Image (tube, grey):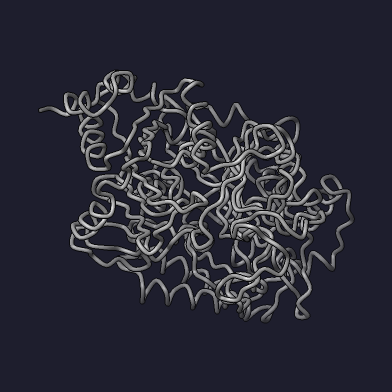
C-alpha cells in the first residue's frame, strides 16, 4: 500500500484532502509512518487559513495548556516546575557511529533513533495530533526552508503560528521540489496542571542525516518549538554544506544621515546586550535572534529566519525597555509563560512595579517565601519566563525588510561579549578575515553571578553560537572565511563591549552609550568618518564621538572618558590571544591555518606597540603617529 492510501485509512476525509493537495510523496511517507506510530486519538491538519489557526488557539485553551488573562488576546502557559529551560544534557546530535566532535553532544544515530521511537510508540493515544506547515525565512524567496511540525501540544503549535510564517501554500507550490525539515514532538503524559510528567524520559534528538528533530516528554519552548534553536542545528549544517551563513544574530536597521538605511547583524552571548541593542527606540528592528546571510551577486544579504519573538521577560521594565513594555501592555496576541498571575494579570521579576505577595505561577499556588522540595525559595516568576509575540506588533519594526524575499544588504556585522578589562567599547576590523578571527572566532563572555555563582569566568563562545553548533568548529570557521571570498563587497566587521570597568570595578560605559557606537559604525560603513589605526583594528576619533554623543544622547563626552575607554590594554589583549590560540590548538580539529596566522600578526603588532608606548596605550598616542 502506498503512503497516500495509508493516509486515506488513517485520516478523516477532510484532513486527508488537505494532505493530498500537497504533491510530495516524501511528505506523505513521513506522515503515514508517524501517524501510525504515534497512534493519536484525533488528527488535525493546519492549512494557512485563519480558521485553522483559530482552531489551534482554541484547543490550547480547551486542553488547559493555556489560560486566558484579563487583557484580550493574552494567555498564560505553564511548564512543569523542572522543565523550565533547554535540556542541554539530553539534547543530542545523532551522528552515524556516534562520532565524537569537540564541544558537541553527540550520540550514535542508530541507538538514538531506536530509543526515541520506543519512547514515542503510542505516546499520543487519546490525544490530538496537530500537523502544521511553516517556512523558515520569508516565503517564496532564496531564504525559504519549508518545515513540517507534528505535535500533540496545542501550545507548541500556537507558539509556532506566532513565531513563523505559515507554509502550507508553500508546500503546495513547491510540490515534489520541497526539501523540507521535519519535527516530531510529544509532551508525553500530562499531570493535573497539564504539564509534562515523565521528565526523566525527556529527550531531544536532532538527526543530522535526515534533517529531523525528535522531542518527547517536555513542553518548554526551547525543547519543543522545533523551528527555533532545534532547527538552528539543521540550518547551520545546511549553510556550511552550501556555503552561506546561518547565524545567532539580530538583524536591525540603523538610520544614518539624510534618511539612509544601513542594516547590521549582531551576535552576542546571553546577557551581553543583544536585545537592548536591537531595540534602541530610534532605530528599527528586523529580527532579534536568528539570521540567514546569503551571497547574492557578490553582496551579503540577510533575512530574519522568524517573524516573532520568544523573549526572556525577566527585567523588562518601562524605563529600560519602553518598546517591549508597550507591546506587552497592548491587547495583541501574546503567550506569557511561567510568570506570576494574580487577578488575571501577569507579573514578572524586576519589572519595576510592585509584585503581589501571592498568586499562581510555575510552581502552582504561590505565596512569598514558598520553597520547593530542595529548599530553594521560589521567585514570583521563573528567571527564564518568556513572552511570545509577533514582530508586526512592534512600533519600531521594519516590516518591509522583514518580509522582503530578497532580504536586505548587510552593511556591518557586530560581535559583542561581556568583558571587564580587555576589549574597548567599539572597534572595526581591518578586513573580513581579521574580523572573523579576532572578533567572531575569539569571542568570550564572562559569566555573571546570577548564572554560575562565580563571576568573571571567561567562557569561550565563538560567534555566540557554541551551544547550537552542529558541525566541527574548524569547518564552521573555514566556511566563514570562504564566504567572504564570494563577495565583491564584504560587510564591515565590528566588535563591541558594553561591560568595561576601571581598576575599582566602576563601569566605564553608560547603558545607552551603545546607541552612539551604532551611529559611529553606520558612518564607518559608508566611509563618512576617519578612524585611528591601532594594533587591534580601527577605533573612533575623539572629535567624532563628541559630536555623536551630543547629537544622539544630548550628552557631553569628556577626553578623560574617551581615553579610559579606548586605551589599548596590551597585557590583557596578549593574554586573550594566548587563551584563544590554546583552545584552537588543543581542542579544535582541522582549524584553518589562517586563524593562527591572523592571531600571530595581531600579537606582533601589540608587542611592537608595547615596545614603543608601554603596556597601556592612550588612543591619542596612535593618533599622533
Viewer-proximal residue among 485 and 3 = 3
Q: Is residue 390 above or below residue 171?
A: below
Could you say where residue 559 lies in the image, as x and y percent from the top left?
A: 85, 64
Could you say which quadrant of the image residue 364 lies in?
bottom right
Give the percent coordinates (x, y) of residue 293: 46, 41
Residue 71 lies left or right of residue 153; in this view the side is right
For the N terminus, give its image quadrant.
top left
Residue farthest toward the front in the current orientation of the protein = 192
Residue 326 visible in the displayed image: yes
Q: Is residue 268 above or below residue 405?
A: below
Residue 81 percent location from the top left of the image: 53, 61
Residue 504, image x and y in percent?
Answer: 78, 80
State the image quarter where residue 147 is shown: top left
Taking the image as shown, residue 172 lies to the left or right of residue 503, namely: left
Residue at the image point whose x is 51% and y is 37% from the top: 60
Q: How many marks?
A: 0
Q: Considering depth in this image, is 321 or 251 the residue closer to the camera? A: 321
Q: Is residue 440 above or below residue 515?
A: below
Question: Does the rendering let one see residue 303?
Answer: no
**Residue at coordinates 70% horizontally, 41% vertically from top-left?**
328
* Image quadrant containing the C terminus: bottom right
Towards the viewer: 487 or 130: 130
Q: Is residue 296 left or right of residue 609?
A: left
Q: Residue at x 57, y 67 (%)?
A: 445
Is residue 440 shown left or right of residue 522?
Answer: left
Residue 438 or residue 537, whichever sits in front: 438
109 relative to 548, above or below: below
Amino acid at each position: 500500500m502506498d503512503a497516500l492510501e495509508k493516509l486515506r485509512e488513517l485520516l478523516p476525509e477532510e484532513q486527508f484532502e488537505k494532505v493530498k493537495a500537497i504533491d510530495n510523496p516524501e511528505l506523505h511517507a513521513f506522515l503515514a509512518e508517524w501517524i501510525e506510530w504515534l497512534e493519536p486519538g484525533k488528527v488535525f491538519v493546519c492549512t494557512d487559513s485563519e480558521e485553522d489557526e483559530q482552531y489551534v488557539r482554541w484547543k490550547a485553551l480547551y486542553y488547559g495548556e493555556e489560560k486566558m488573562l484579563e487583557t484580550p488576546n493574552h494567555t498564560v502557559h505553564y511548564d512543569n516546575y523542572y522543565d523550565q529551560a533547554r535540556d542541554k544534557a539530553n539534547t543530542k546530535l545523532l551522528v552515524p557511529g556516534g562520532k565524537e566532535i569537540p564541544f558537541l553532544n553527540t550520540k550514535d544515530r542508530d541507538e538514538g533513533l531506536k530509543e526515541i521511537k520506543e519512547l514515542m510508540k503510542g505516546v499520543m493515544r487519546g490525544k490530538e495530533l496537530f500537523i502544521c506547515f511553516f517556512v523558515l525565512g520569508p516565503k517564496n524567496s532564496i531564504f525559504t526552508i519549508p518545515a513540517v511540525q507534528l505535535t500533540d501540544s496545542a501550545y507548541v503549535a500556537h507558539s509556532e503560528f506566532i513565531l513563523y510564517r505559515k507554509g502550507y501554500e508553500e508546500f503546495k507550490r513547491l510540490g515534489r521540489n520541497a526539501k523540507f525539515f521535519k519535527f516530531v514532538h510529544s509532551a508525553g503524559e500530562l499531570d493535573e496542571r497539564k504539564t509534562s510528567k515523565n521528565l526523566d524520559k525527556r529527550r531531544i534528538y536532532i538527526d543530522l542525516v535526515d534533517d529531523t528533530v525528535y522531542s518527547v516528554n517536555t513542553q518548554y519552548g526551547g525543547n519543543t518549538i522545533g523551528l527555533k534553536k532545534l532547527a538552528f542545528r539543521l540550518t547551520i549544517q545546511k549553510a556550511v554544506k552550501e556555503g552561506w551563513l546561518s547565524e545567532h544574530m539580530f538583524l536591525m536597521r540603523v538610520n544614518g544621515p539624510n534618511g539612509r538605511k544601513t542594516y547590521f547583524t549582531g551576535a552576542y552571548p546571553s546577557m551581553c546586550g543583544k536585545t537592548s541593542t536591537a531595540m534602541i527606540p530610534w532605530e528599527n528592528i528586523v529580527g532579534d535572534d536568528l539570521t540567514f546571510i546569503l551571497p547574492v551577486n557578490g553582496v551579503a544579504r540577510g533575512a530574519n529566519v522568524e517573524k516573532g519573538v520568544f523573549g526572556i521577560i525577566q527585567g523588562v521594565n518601562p524605563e529600560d525597555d519602553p518598546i517591549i513594555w508597550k507591546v506587552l501592555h497592548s491587547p495583541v496576541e501574546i503567550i506569557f509563560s511561567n510568570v506570576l498571575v494574580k487577578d488575571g494579570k501577569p507579573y514578572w521579576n524586576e519589572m519595576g512595579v510592585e509584585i503581589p505577595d501571592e498568586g499562581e505561577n510555575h510552581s502552582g499556588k504561590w505565596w512569598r517565601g514558598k520553597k520547593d522540595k530542595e529548599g530553594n525559595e521560589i521567585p514570583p516568576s521563573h528567571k527564564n519566563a518568556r513572552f511570545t509575540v509577533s514582530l508586526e506588533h512592534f512600533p519600531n519594526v521594519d516590516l518591509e525588510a522583514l518580509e522582503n524575499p530578497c532580504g536586505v544588504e548587510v552593511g556591518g556585522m557586530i560581535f559583542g561579549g561581556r568583558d571587564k578589562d580587555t576589549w574597548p567599547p567599539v572597534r572595526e576590523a581591518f578586513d573580513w578575515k581579521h574580523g572573523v578571527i579576532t572578533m567572531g572566532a575569539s569571542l568570550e563572555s564572562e559569566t555573571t553571578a546570577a548564572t554560575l555563582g562565580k563571576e568573571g569566568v571567561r567562557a569561550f563562545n565563538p560567534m555566540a553560537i557554541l551551544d547550537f553548533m552542529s558541525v566541527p568548529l574548524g569547518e564552521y570557521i573555514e566556511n566563514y572565511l570562504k564566504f567572504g571570498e564570494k563577495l565583491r563587497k564584504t560587510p564591515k566587521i565590528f566588535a563591541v563591549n558594553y561591560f568595561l570597568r576601571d581598576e575599582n570595578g566602576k563601569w566605564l560605559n553608560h547603558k545607552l552609550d551603545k546607541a552612539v557606537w551604532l551611529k559611529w559604525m553606520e558612518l564607518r560603513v559608508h566611509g563618512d568618518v576617519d578612524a585611528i589605526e591601532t594594533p587591534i583594528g580601527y577605533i573612533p576619533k575623539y572629535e567624532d564621538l563628541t559630536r555623536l554623543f551630543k547629537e544622539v544622547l544630548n550628552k557631553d563626552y569628556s577626553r578623560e572618558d574617551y581615553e579610559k575607554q579606548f586605551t589599548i590594554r596590551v597585557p590583557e589583549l596578549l593574554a586573550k590571544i594566548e587563551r584563544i590560540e590554546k583552545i584552537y590548538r588543543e581542542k579544535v580539529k582541522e582549524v584553518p591555518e589562517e586563524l593562527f596566522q591572523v592571531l600571530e600578526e595581531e600579537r606582533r603588532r601589540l608587542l611592537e606597540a608595547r615596545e614603543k608606548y608601554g603596556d597601556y596605550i592612550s588612543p591619542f598616542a596612535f593618533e599622533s603617529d
